[in-house]
Amino acid sequence: MKRNNAQRFWIMNRRMKYLFLVTAALLFMATGADAQNSADSLQSGHSENVTIYGTSRPVIRQAFQKYWQPTDYKINIPSGTGSALSLPGAVPTKITLQTMKPEPVDTYVPLENWNNLVRGGFGSRMTPYAELFHSQGKEDSYRWNVHLYHFSSFLNIKNYLPSPHSTTLAETSFKKFFPYHVLSLEAGYRINTLRYYGYNTLGDTLTYNKNNDQLKQLYQLGSASVSFGDTYRNFDKLHYQITAKGYYFGDRFGMDEWHADARFDVHKAFEVTNVFNHQQLGVEGNYSFYREKNTYQTRRDNFLSLLPYFDARYGIFSLRAGVHVEWLQALGKKLYAYPFLNVRMNIIPEAFSLFAGVDGGLKKNSYYSLVTANPFLYSFDNSYQWENDQFSVHAGFNGNFARRLGFEMEAGVKYFKNKAFFDYVWSNTYRIPASDSVMRFVKNAFYVSYANGNVFYISGGLSYENAPNVKVWLTGKYQEFQLDNGMKPLYEPDLEVQLGSSVRVTKKASGWIQAAYVGERWAAHRFLSGGSVVSNPYYRLPAYVDVNLGGNYRFDKQLSGFVKVTNLLNKQYWQFNEYPVAGIEVMLGASYRF
């Protein structure tokens, strides 16, 4: 459906209002601030002070530092209401809320170091859980970590076909520290099982065999990586980071994916001009290979990317500028180029900064990434295209006050091609019951559809930490999609908000609460009527709120207990069309460290 000029003007006017509000806030907060130099990003080193605690202690204010990624252990106590698939991956700094999988926060800080942590529990929805961490090392020499984990859920969701699922994993990492270099090795294996359960009427269950193999799924993932880089603090040295990684991902229906990736970053300070306080030239690059195979065909993609860049700093201003040059071989060969620019103004060093930038590039809609987002993906779909982010622009601010109140806000627009959305598989139909004249579409699987368009977004967060007694955090994201051809952004919420807090009650007892609001999402009805697809299949899934809470009590230095309640409101809301989550669950457990 094409839009007329009046509609386009109305959309642009509304977006300009949002941008005006963000700009006004930036100018207001920047007024009267002192200008000083910031620490140079090239200064780097390593710290291997690793201590395993009974539960995680996230430093919330760090989460809003640009490009920061957490590295400390976080003991995950799974939620029976969550997705059946939970696979490892990089931790993004952007806000991407999913169904709540809360982690209890223990504010008790022991002085001792422990090499081992054993944790286990059992939930009211027949959910046994066990986890083991081992860590050992020598200061300035090496660090070795091992993580074992298992979680199962056996109780069926009310009025649905059997829906058990399980997750089992084993992973290890090793870091070797040299005087001016670090070598990192990682490897892991994970297996997930689940039953499809997208049938919710008596007619559905009467027609189908509950033990039908087509309703079962299994995913396995094997991954490994190696990286080597320097820790020089001298700007005149040649700095570099080299990483090679890969994975195998497959399911029980013969669909599998192999991925290998090699990337590097090399940079060095140069006296290109005396205008800047500091400047450097560098180049980032990576090569990626994908091989996807199902029972029908095999596809291979090759991708090469190079980003030559220039870094500079002048007073409170810093910038990085370059050009992404990318080559893709996937159903043909093509060369792409995208401008890249990031500008930052450090109004108050380490306290308040403004930033803005433009970017673009290609990224793979892989089977692994899509199944991680929706485990009910149709196994025989082999059209995993590359998303082309043609152009994006963003601006915002971040910082903290007194190292206790952290904040960040960002607004931007991104124009894209071939963005992936989930829709029903509608090529196969069935009749329920046999005398019914309406052919209904298969409900227990989704395929991937692609759309072109743009998205306008505003995201931000606040965090407060008065360690070790109180931590509070609030994050949110608003997004508005405009897609071509009248398509809808299926299962993309307009608004997501997450609120959490942890409180230390005594030296031994602490509690936490997390709540998430997920706004309305577009979904689609896919069924035949009179031999043709219904003309208007789109409708809105209602918004939902998920509340989770828990507590921890430490009996002594080694033994502690916990209680966790998920989906406190006992709502069977839908993540996807006709896929409700489980109801309330209470889990009790204990942990022991030695």
Image: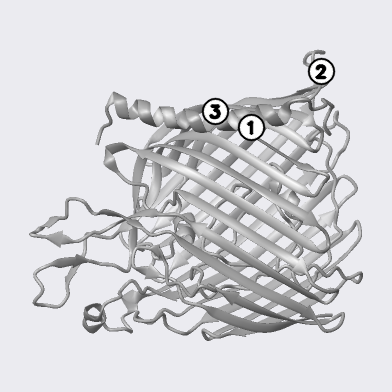
Instruction: Point out the residue furthest to the top here.
Output: 274
The residue depicted at 82 percent of the width and 25 percent of the height is: 35
Residue 578 spot, x, y in % from top left: 34, 67
Question: Of helix, strand and loop, which one carries label 2?
Answer: loop
Q: Tag 3: residue type? A: Phe
Earlier sequence position, callout 1 versus callout 2: 1
Earlier sequence position, callout 2 versus callout 3: 3
Mark nearest the camera among 1 and 2 is: 1
Q: Report the side of 68 relative to 299 (left or right).
A: right
Residue that mark 1 sits on? 25
The residue depicted at 85 percent of the width and 57 percent of the height is: 48
Q: Residues within 10 Å of mark 1 (few under 14, many from 20)?
A: some
CB-based contact (under 8 Å), mark 1 and mark 2 = no
The disc at residue 271 is 2
Occupied quadrant, residue 568: bottom right
Query: How far separated are the C-alphas under marks 2 and 3?
Result: 39 Å
Please state which of residues 269 and 167 is positioned toward the viewer in this rendering: 167
Query: How far separated are the C-alphas under marks 1 and 2?
Result: 37 Å
Residue that mark 3 sits on? 20
Mark nearest the camera among 2 and 3 is: 3
Question: Of helix, strand and loop, which one carries label 3?
Answer: helix
